[in-house]
Image (tube, rainbow, N blue to C red):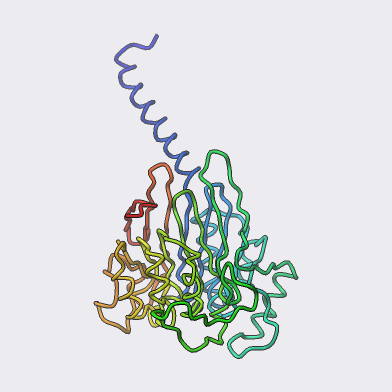
Amino acid sequence: MIPSTINKVIAPLVAVASMLFLSDSIVAAKTLDIYFIDVEGGAATLIVTPLGESILVDSGFPGDRDAGRIARVARDVAHLNEIDHYITTHWHRDHVGGIARLAELIPVRRYYDHGLPGAPAVDIPPELIEAYKKTTQGRNEALRAGDEIKLRNAGTIRRLRLEVLAASGVVKGELPGAPQIRICNPNLKVKPEDKTDNANSIAFVLSYGGFRFFDGGDLTWNVENKLVCPRDVVGIVDVYQVDHHGSDTSNNPALVNSLMPRVAIINNGARKAGDPGTFATLKALPRIESIYQLHRNVLTTENDNTPATYIANEKEDCQGDFIKLSVDQTTRTFTVSIAARQISRSYRMGRRD
Ligand SMILES: [Zn+2]
């Protein structure tokens, strides 16, 4: 029998140790993590599900810098040995540019896009398409609005779902070849037809229990309109990855107001996007609690930037620090953190008030 004095000392320690172990394993088993990797005004969003399945959305610019940053976060921070799913939202160099190099640094299992370009286009660099074809070896799959990327789910974990809501300029519920401009409400403004590949971006909602996240690539104004008019096919979200790096050619208030996010994350560069009009639209949202930026926009004023504690990279010459979002179903909260700056803040998920 253990003497009672020793027991008094040991018992609480054992209890604390087992609690730590328990809470650690619960968190590890149930957190959905999303990393917004700084690729200097491009896009690279890495999603890791509670079961460890990974989805990378876009791969930044060509060259070593962005592929290196993505591989570092994937391997060293998220502890991944491979990327299970890789989505190219559209064919611009700041989105598809890094994949050829990245695939040399970490294995990529499945590739998705909105379909290879049928004809040369001025805004699609042919060498990037060639590099993509060489990397994918024909294993790429074209996604259409309404498609789902099937993710692994386990009985004890809240359901995860990734649904494509727009691709190739067509939104869920429309027929293939639907025109980009649809006048559905006289109060909604349209813009001249966007003939760039931005309008073809894949847009999706990732949902996990009551949590919802929207990533629309570089979707522009007219297709954004169609997502909410005549029928809202998106609904309210908790977190909005701000379209097109926060450009004012995108972020149609019709869509942004309808998404009604609690948190917005802008993957802008120091001198790219994060525009004042978009910032004003976000700031005016009734439910908004925080706006995060990957970079301070050095071209505008303090008033057009979020407070310093919500910016991952203050200096133009930066280390490429990322923003991490972590969704915890046990507490029904999600936490946004900038580890390099020891900044972390939690939010309630799913509230619709
Ligand atoms: Zn872009």
Where is residue 207? Give x, y as percent.
50, 55
- The residue closer to the viewer here, 155 or 306, is 155
Which picture quadrant has residue 254? bottom left
Q: What is the residue that sits farthest to the left in this orientation?
A: 303
Where is residue 18? Give x, y as percent.
42, 30
Which picture quadrant has residue 84? bottom right
Relative side of 56 to 1, left or right:
right
- The residue closer to the viewer here, 294 or 145, is 145
Query: Measuring 60% from the left and 91% from the top, which residue is drawn there?
Result: 122
Where is residue 175? Give x, y as percent.
63, 73
Relative side of 257 to 301, left or right:
right
Query: Measuring 70% from the left and 83% from the top, which residue is drawn there?
Result: 118
Query: Measuring 44% from the left and 34% from the top, which residue is drawn there?
Result: 22
Which picture quadrant has residue 154? top right
Image quarter of the N terminus:
top left
Looking at the picture, does residue 152 appear above or below residue 213? Answer: above
